[in-house]
Image (cartoon, grey):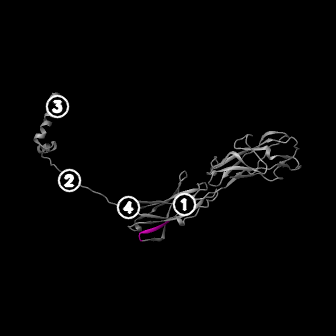
Amino acid sequence: MKKFTIGLLITFALLIPFGAATLSDFYNKITGKPISEEVQLEINVSGGHAPTITVYETLMTDVSGGLNEGPLTTDITIKFEADDLEGIGNINDSSARIQFTKSGEDTRSAICTKVGAESSGTSTNYTCTVTMQFWDGAGTWIINASILDLNGNYAEDTSKTFAVGSTAGFVIYPTSVVWSEINPGATNQPALNSVTLNNTGNIQRNVEVNSTNLLGETDNTKSLLANDFSIDINSGCAGTGMNRFTFVQIVGATLPKGNYLLNDGTGQEIVYFCLNQASSDLTQQIYSTQGEGAWTVRIA
């Protein structure tokens, strides 16, 4: 029975070219079903004109000389114009946005506000205030202004840029370094505290220190020599040796840019002080920078 059924179907298929144009036509002649049907088409056409945008970058806040030092932020005011051939009533004011972008940096953005007094006909102006952080990198940033109309058409302008200048600055804490009591001729005596440098600017810097001798406060003919001290980015006494009245770059000490307010090492460098060798002729008294002046830390 199974073989017969298959053979019948094959024979039927071979006979079709002689009796009808298509199997569908043959079937329709037998059943009387219609050979065509109507299909309804519907296309929703939205507003055909997306707005156009013009950014007034020459009127924005000038930060080419640098941003505010941390922890302060810098507010940048910028304006752009949106033009819609269907009139300003077709512009979605709440969608007005501005963004500042730069490779490797966080995007800074803001929602913009319509300037009613500067709106008429087909064009309207928007003012935006973007807050930049003190660690935002120096260099060229791209401006991205965008808006939607009420038909959902999107427009943006990314053709304009602006410059952020370099800002160099830092603060240190604490501002004093102390040792416990030492004996004449002592070696490898680390300070009781380290010093943390916080980068308040937006560029990475090296760390340099200018040192002085520590004179006795009672007998200033006795001293701890500047050359007997070292500074390192690690605890211990294997750091960079100091040189009296000379700025010396601390090996490995790099002050990166970043949000030091996190206090997790971002935008920070920690340095450690050590007295490598004390003179053997020291007398019992306090030795300090009172006589020759404080040590100076700088970034370069």
Magenta region's main secondary structure?
A: strand
Near mark 1 (Cα within 10 A), the count class, few <14, some 14-19 or many ≥20, is: some
- Residue at the spot of label 2: 38
Mark 4 against mark 1, which lies toward the viewer? 1
Q: Nearer the viewer, residue 296 or 3?
A: 296
Mark 3 against mark 2, which lies toward the viewer? 3
Q: Is 68 left or right of 15, judged from the image as shown?
A: right
Give the amino acid type for the residue marked by disc 2 in the picture. Answer: Glu
Q: Is 199 left or right of 282, judged from the image as shown?
A: left
Mark 4–mark 2 distance (CA, rounded to whole Å): 31 Å
Q: Residue 253 at what x, y percent from top left?
A: 68, 46
Disc with the residue nearer the chain's start (3 vs 2): 3
- Residue at the spot of label 4: 151
Q: Is residue 10 above or below residue 198?
A: above
Residues under numbered marks 4 and 2 in contact, where contact means CB atoms less than 8 Å apart: no
Classify mark 2: helix, strand or loop: loop
Disc with the residue nearer the chain's start (4 vs 1): 4
- Residue at the spot of label 1: 162
Disc number for residue 72: none
Mark 4–mark 3 distance (CA, rounded to whole Å): 59 Å
Q: Residue 49 at what x, y percent from top left?
A: 37, 63
Mark 4–mark 1 distance (CA, rounded to whole Å): 32 Å
**Magenta part of the protein: which range?**
121-127
Q: Is residue 216 magenta?
A: no
The residue sitting at 16% across, 28% down in the picture is 3
